[in-house]
Amino acid sequence: MKNCLVVDDSRVIRKVSRHILETLGYSVSEAENGQEGLERCEESMPDVVLLDWNMPVMTGIEFITHLRQREGGDKPKVVFCTTENDVSHIREAISAGADEYVMKPFDHETLQIKLQLVGMG
């Protein structure tokens, strides 16, 4: 079973994401900020990370920068899930190491397609 870490400061987004991911056959862990997300990665590196951009403590960009520098941190597919939709944000996310980008709010079908695009469908 593939594991997905959902890193988002919104409990509602984490809950909705968990529901969608579990119906797609993933085991899901959660973190409410980037620092907590990195701690979860230390415990067990996920196959996929759904990552929010704007969070307290550590932003999504800071999280992915730290993740990609860690041993094994190049392995997880990272999908940014955010309301930031301008080209400069998308470019920054991809250059920081993100594999894909999905706009909030998203639904089951949209998330499934994005996971398929990164080879995790």
Image: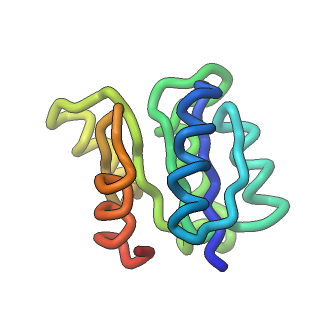
Identify the residue at image location x=55%, y=62%. 23
Q: Quadrant of the C terminus?
A: bottom left
Corner quadrant of residue 107: top left
Residue 11, horizontal then vertical, whole percent: 64, 27
Corner quadrant of residue 35: top right
Residue 2, horizontal then vertical, whole percent: 62, 75
Residue projecting furthest to the right = 43
Q: Quadrant of the N terminus?
A: bottom right
Query: How many numbered callouts?
Result: 0
Q: Answer left or right for 74 relative to 15.
A: left
Residue 65 in view, yes or no:
no
Up/down of 80 relative to 10, above or below: below
Residue projecting furthest to the front = 23
Identify the residue at image location x=35%, y=32%. 105
Residue projecting furthest to the left = 87
Structure colour scheme: rainbow
Identify the residue at image location x=17%, y=30%. 86
Residue 9, horizontal then vertical, whole percent: 61, 26
Up/down of 65 relative to 105, above or below: below
- Taking depth in this image into account, of 67 and 15 the one nearest to the observer is 15
Up/down of 74 relative to 39, above or below: below
Identify the residue at image location x=60%, y=55%. 67
Corner quadrant of residue 88: top left
Residue 86 in view, yes or no:
yes
Residue 61, horizontal then vertical, whole percent: 47, 39
Q: Answer left or right for 79 relative to 20.
A: left
